[in-house]
Amino acid sequence: MAVRAAGQIAGICHLYRSSSLGGFRTLSQNVSSSKHTPSNAPETTVDHLIYTPEHFALKESIKKIIDQEINPHVDQWEAEGKFPAHRIFKILGNAGILGVNKPVEYGGLGLDFSYSVAVSEELGNIRCGGIPMAIGVQTDMATPALARFGSHELKTEFLLPSILGDKVACLGVSEVGAGSDVSSIMTKAVRQGDEYVINGGKMWTTNGTQADWMCLLANTSDGPPHRNKSLICLPMDLPGVHIARQIDKMGMRSSDTAEVFFDDVRVPSKNVIGKEGMGFTYQMLQFQEERLWAVANTLTTMDIVIQETIDYTRQRKIFKMPVLHHQTVHFRLAELQTEVELLRSLLHRATALFIKGNDVTKLASMAKLKAGRLARELGDSCLQYWGGMGFTNDVLVSRFYRDSRLISIGGGADEVMLGIICKYMDTLPNPPR
Ligand SMILES: Cc1cc2nc3c(=O)[nH]c(=O)nc-3n(C[C@H](O)[C@H](O)[C@H](O)COP(=O)(O)OP(=O)(O)OC[C@H]3O[C@@H](n4cnc5c(N)ncnc54)[C@H](O)[C@@H]3O)c2cc1C
């Protein structure tokens, strides 16, 4: 296994040829680039809990792409409210990064989920939350169920081009009237012959204005809400698919978020992923990967925000000494770094158990809950130490403060995570009879 992975990762590194971008440098990099050893320096290639030298090689190849193809443009894409998903996904697809844990026969690397976690951690080096989130939707939110349960025909049509970076995917679960309570979605897919006719709409669809296909959750019968839903691969260019608008958001600015309507959209019945009626269950399984992915992605950015706060406060003097030298500041940063390391340990433990086939719903929910709460605390504390500079749009900390607020809301809000944890702790009151 290690030998096979080593060959594949070497292949990735070889595949990716860096392009020179000249001396382009963004304002935020000018203000906050770090010259010190990053605070996650203890991560070593030897005796790591889940990462092998192959994981680290993969991370290094991703870092090169980020530095050369993504970070120089982030400020521009944030200002424009969208990044060019097709162009960036093609670069990532060429490098093998969009399907590290997907089957080899569909363009993936056939590695385990720990490689996805490594990719996600590395994508945390992108200087915004929107682009990593869009990539995560492609790799770990819209495609896991298709890879696991989809037919060969569906995988060939939708999974393969998504892994190669030729098609952009989106996930259509949330609706105007249903987010936390997924079981109450209203979008209907009614069987007519060998087609479904779809009516309804989806809200908050990441990649929605650029996507080629949607992994759609719809009601395919009138049965009980946990058994009447199916996941359907829906091409976004079908007649009756309308992008109503791109939503204007406080954060994740470079990620396009759409509201989508379906008006008598006809899709072949063979586009159902796996078994009809299993969509809710498949989606809940898909959420495990989404949540672990989201935690991994936050960790690196949290490290960077702490480190850049250290760098800034070390050189910024108040009352004749650096801001950092005030005990309240360096003690607080030490506390926050400790919390980040605790979260990293939980993530790696959950990942190690997951790749051995265990149900990690409880640990993944705990990690997602903690990631959202810690990101809010960390963003707020660090921004404070930047003073007025923290309130500008020129520094990563203010972008992180805005972007990371989503972690406690998206992919299951904090309260939804608490509900799941309570279920596992058997502390929920019995429902009234
Ligand atoms: C930028 C962005 C991108 C997104 N991308 C996607 C995407 O690609 N695909 C997709 O399908 N969805 C996406 N979402 C939707 C996201 O998953 C939902 O916003 C989330 O699930 C919450 O649903 P809601 O917004 O409808 O809030 P609601 O369900 O209305 O909940 C409101 C609040 O109620 C509280 N609450 C929830 N449950 C409980 C409880 N049991 N007890 C007490 N309080 C509770 C929580 O604080 C919650 O925030 C995205 C959202 C955003 C903002």
Image: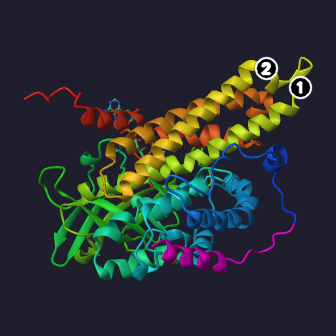
* Tag 2 residue: 326
Of the pair 99 and 175, the residue shown nearer to us: 99
Q: Residue furthest left?
A: 433
Q: Amino acid at mark 1?
A: Lys
Measured as percent of width and height from the top left, residue 286 is found at: 35, 57
Query: Does label 1 point to a residue whose CB lies under 8 Å from ligand 1?
Result: no
* Tag 1 residue: 317
Quadrant of the image where one finds ligand 1: top left
Measured as percent of width and height from the top left, residue 381 is found at: 66, 27
71 lies above or below 323: below
Residue 11 highlighted magenta (yes or no): yes
- Label 2: few (<14), some (14–19) or many (≥20) C-alpha neighbours in 10 Å: few
Measured as percent of width and height from the top left, residue 152 is found at: 30, 81
Of the pair 234 and 20, the residue shown nearer to us: 20
Q: Residue furthest top?
A: 319
Residue 45's disc is: none
Figure quadrant of residue 340: top right
Q: Amino acid at mark 2?
A: His
Residue 255 visible within the image: no
- Label 1: few (<14), some (14–19) or many (≥20) C-alpha neighbours in 10 Å: few
Secondary structure, mark 2, is loop
Label located before the other in sequence (1 or 2): 1
Residue 9 highlighted magenta (yes or no): yes
- Specify the segment rendered in magenta: 1-22
Is residue 91 toward the left or the right of residue 307 in the image? left
Mark-to-mark CA distance, 1 and 2: 10 Å
